[in-house]
Amino acid sequence: GAVVSQHPSRVICKSGTSVKIECRSLDFQATTMFWYRQFPKQSLMLMATSNEGSKATYEQGVEKDKFLINHASLTLSTLTVTSAHPEDSSFYICSANLPPTDTQYFGPGTRLTVL
Amino acid sequence: AQSVTQLDSQVPVFEEAPVELRCNYSSSVSVYLFWYVQYPNQGLQLLLKYLSGSTLVKGINGFEAEFNKSQTSFHLRKPSVHISDTAEYFCAVSDGDYKLSFGAGTTVTVRA
């Protein structure tokens, strides 16, 4: 149980285009999902908290207009990187909170490369 | 927000030897504690967690961790490692707001 999927696993795009990443909780409902960014050889940096049916909460320094988050259902959250640039290239990982505890289950990650 | 310190950035270890990965956190309130493992180019997999109760927690793949409130530590141990345990290990803490604070990670390299 507690499986989280992400799609796509890898994406390469041109500078200036937008990319959408999906995060799904496959066998449980998640009112809260999280989006992280991970640079090579580094820890995870929380970008935003995604709440079903409401606006996402962004961490300090994360541009909400650049990283659009939508949590339209209890099993799906999406992250859209708008007008991507090479510096947005990174490994993006989502997680879903399994209630009633604080246990987060992570997706396999999406490798974004912006040319 | 919590502060999590993983004291060892890299831990080389021989196969079948024991390993301990150290984790300390800063908190004056009750916390939830987690250890995750990350294999190359993959997401994080939950190894074990402490929410309440017994301070010795057993997880998957033969790992265990002990919560020590007085020392604000949550060290991870395995009595005998395998080559397949080579990975990045992250300690994480939550103080009940559903957010996790991660340590910098410890790279474990198991050699034959």
Image (cartoon, rainbow, N blue to C red):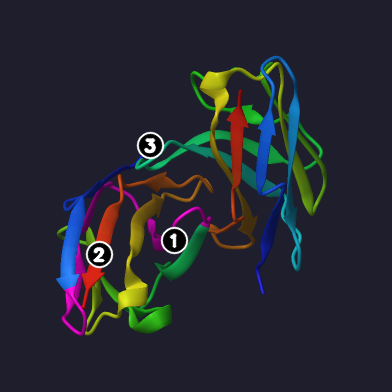
Q: Is residue B67 visible?
A: no
The residue at which mark 2 appears reads as: B109
Dot 1: element = loop
Query: How far across and down, in percent of the image, does residue B72 sit?
Result: 21, 56
Q: Is residue A93 magenta?
A: no
Which amino acid, by three-letter code, is at mark 1?
A: Tyr
| Image point (15%, 59%), residue name | B71
Decide: is A93 above or below B34: above
The chain under label 2 reads B
Q: Earlier in the sequence, mark 2 or mark 1?
A: 1
Query: How far across and down, in percent of the image, does residue B95 sit?
Result: 42, 49
Query: How far across and down, in percent of the image, does residue A41 sit?
Result: 35, 42
Q: Is residue A42 visible?
A: yes
* Mark 1 surroundings within 10 Å by alpha-carbon count, few (fewer than 14), some (14 through 19), many (20 or more): some
Q: Earlier in the sequence, mark 3 or mark 1?
A: 3
The chain under label 1 reads B
Which part of the image, by quadrant, shows the N terminus of chain A? Answer: bottom right
Q: Is residue B42 magenta?
A: yes
Which amino acid, by three-letter code, is at mark 2?
A: Thr
Residue span colored magenta: B14-43
Which is closer to the viewer, label 2 or label 3? Answer: 2
Mark number displayed over residue B39:
1
| Image point (16%, 60%), residue name | B70
Decide: is A10 above or below A103: above
The chain under label 3 reads B
* Mark 2 surroundings within 10 Å by alpha-carbon count, few (fewer than 14), some (14 through 19), many (20 or more): some
Which amino acid, by three-letter code, is at mark 3?
A: Ala
